[in-house]
Amino acid sequence: MLPDTPENLKNGRPRSLDDRDGRWGELHLRVPYRLRATRDVFEINAPELISVIETPSDRPAQVLTIMDQGLHEAQPDLLRRVESYLRAHEDRVTPAGSALFLPGGEAAKNDPALIDEVLSAIHERGICRHSYVLAIGGGAVLDAAGFAAATAHRGVRLIRLPSTTLAQGDAGVGVKNGVNRFGKKNFLGTFAVPWAVINDFNLLRTLSGRDWRCGFSEAVKVALVKDAGFFRLIESSIGAINDRDLAVAGPIIQRSAELHLKHILSGGDPFELTTARPLDFGHWAAHKLEQMTSFDLRHGEAVAIGLALDVVYAERTGLLAAPDRERILACLLALGFDLHHPALHETETLLEGLDEFREHLGGRLTIALINGIGEQSDVHEIDPSVVREAIDDLSAGGLKTGRRGGDQRGGG
Amino acid sequence: MLPDTPENLKNGRPRSLDDRDGRWGELHLRVPYRLRATRDVFEINAPELISVIETPSDRPAQVLTIMDQGLHEAQPDLLRRVESYLRAHEDRVTPAGSALFLPGGEAAKNDPALIDEVLSAIHERGICRHSYVLAIGGGAVLDAAGFAAATAHRGVRLIRLPSTTLAQGDAGVGVKNGVNRFGKKNFLGTFAVPWAVINDFNLLRTLSGRDWRCGFSEAVKVALVKDAGFFRLIESSIGAINDRDLAVAGPIIQRSAELHLKHILSGGDPFELTTARPLDFGHWAAHKLEQMTSFDLRHGEAVAIGLALDVVYAERTGLLAAPDRERILACLLALGFDLHHPALHETETLLEGLDEFREHLGGRLTIALINGIGEQSDVHEIDPSVVREAIDDLSAGGLKTGRRGGDQRGGG
């Protein structure tokens, strides 16, 4: 059973025969995470972008720009400003041809041909592992561009400029990318550390009311599982958030980003290889609701419903006190979220989301709940009859009062 | 230029405005590397495979077997033995359906439909991130199966059972996978730590003489850049290697694997994000020769030629002493390698390999040479006229004497 002699060849590394786990060594990876916040990253003298770029000794660094089509339409001047910025720093960077455009929203993640387009550009324009892909857009565009960037040459350097509240506060910050296959969200993807993430709050100015709102359900989520003080800050800032005051809302988004990132970097298992979990409170139902509504529900909207469902569930199973439940639901409603959707009543289908959630994350079913504001508490079983009761609660009248929001604005 | 207030929100994490590099934190990943050597891994009581599998608390772990078609044809009994082994341990593992087959050799890496087949199986059979893909085969099959395993659900657990000397000694050990696109070798791939690598020397018994030989050029390579003592061991074992004595050859393959892996794990940059390089002595020409011959030249054969070319180049540029050059060429010849190929005379095309090599690895051109046996010495420029002279040396008579080998055996 034992090998003939290789043990003998491990000079200086004697290995016990009891080492049944077969560990020969350990891979040890340390990678800096660059995260910055700013306003107007493409102002010619703004240092945030140019200062993260490492220029090769013999020529400027190549930069391939990939832009969200929706953002381009909402901010038609942006592309010219990107180009001017790169030109102003031509001693250090050079554009690798003209920008590529990807459709915004889930469409970017559903069409394999779009990934091929990005890969072709990387191939044809000679982008190497020390060149940069500058991806500007919402979470879906960052995810799709990020998957292409992470797999071409086994990874070219990706700089993410998230352009939505959701992407700046959560989806664009972290170490994942992903595209959809077989009707499964993020079936394909990798863990890969982006070279840098720069949150430019000015990019948020042209979001629709729906998209503006979406990032704040993730902010509420991370506050609920990590930081009661942050939840209070959100509660007290609802007016300014709904008024789209960037001086208040920007730092809230940034705090959400930082809490998400801190969870990833400080948990000891950033690539979720063993038991580490993402911050996925409210997400089992959210993922399924997005799928069931063919992504008519935006992720942030689905998360608000998923949070509400799990908060009511937690209260009904005795984990959470009723006043906390009320505060949370009131906060989500005041931020303008609907906490109910007809798809909730296709409850059998919804509950299939539990198993898909388990399969995607692997291992035993683990659902994050809370037993207080700022206090996560995991469970490994979900009682379908209580889920049904919670759905009835959400569809009952009272919860829909208090809604307000900012749907009046246009733009992508 | 500075953000309005997010700095203020970084409670307890004051950040200097001089921190121009934008580092917010650091990702820190530690992953065990399980590497084992054995004979007859599927003997029912053999512990090497079953002991690396972590069984979930509530059910056996799912195992999807992917097998090299060529290996299956050469060892028709193997599949039944895999199935018996899994059945004998059914308390801990359960097969996720029947085995998938991938064509052996570069074909596995050239056809995107094969990757899709593996992804479909992972999707349809409900393989999760805590399930296992057991890939058994040559380096190309491990690379293709590994790319699918690394991107499905952002990575399911991959156990590699390399079945060639090349894969056991080099290609199957490490943290990369890759498939070919746009005519570029390994254009697509990821860095991903396999769950375990188990070298079963018995799998090598049915290799053809060509394939048997191929792993030893990589063993010579790693000896030349890392370990003069290992080079002497290879020199003194040539007879036993050519006689395919597994008791001698197996440990040499394993030592090659260990030196490759040690280079990756101890270099501080296992994912080659900054300046770390793989052990790529002799590889700029080898990669190009494979491509130029449409992979008629096997990787190990191309590496032998690439080594010879760079050894002669190093001697001609004064880096390497002539007696060392002679020893190295004599060793490669005695192992049965041809050190010349007509494609070398398409020298313009061959030299394009330098730029493709630079692009794939990124950054400045860096070519590993040696200035002694066991002593690597990098250069950043290659003189095409000296390459031409080195090719003339290789095509001149004397170097082809002494050739012997073991082409008499059949099998895949």
Image: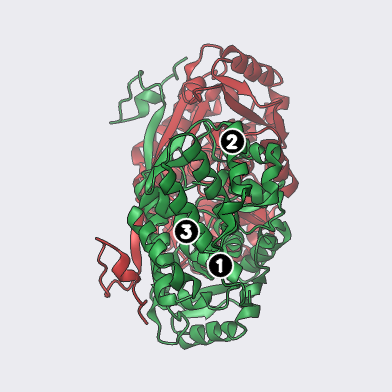
Chain colours: A green, B red
Q: Quadrant of residue A21?
A: top left
Q: What residue type is labelled 2?
A: Cys
Q: Residue at x 37, y 38 (%)?
A: A26
Q: Give the vertical position of A61 relative to B104 (above or below).
A: below
Point out residue B247 in the picture as x, y percentages from the top left corner: 47, 21
Is B20 on the left-hand or right-hand side of B271? left
* Tag nearer the camera, 2 or 1: 1
Label 2 to label 1: alpha-carbon separation = 41 Å
Residue tagged 1: A404
Q: What residue type is labelled 1?
A: Arg
Give me the chain letter of mark 1. A
Residue tagged 3: A331
Q: What residue type is labelled 3?
A: Cys
| Disc 2 to disc 1: CB gap under 8 Å | no
Give me the chain letter of mark 2. B
Q: Of A110 and B154, which appears nearest the observer?
A: A110
Point out residue A74 in the picture as x, y percentages from the top left corner: 62, 79
Q: Of B264 and A335, which appears nearest the observer?
A: A335
Crowd class of label 3 (few under 14; some 14 to 19; many from 20; radius 10 Å): many
Label 3 to label 2: alpha-carbon separation = 36 Å
* Tag nearer the camera, 3 or 2: 3
Badge number at residue B219: none
Q: Which residue is drawn at 54% across and 41% down?
A: B171
The disc, 1 or 3, on the residue closer to the chain's N-terminal end is 3
Q: Of B324 and B125, which appears nearest the observer?
A: B125
Residue tagged 2: B128
Is B263 on the left-hand or right-hand side of A294? left
For the residues tagged 1 and 3, is the chain the same?
Answer: yes
Crowd class of label 1 (few under 14; some 14 to 19; many from 20; radius 10 Å): few
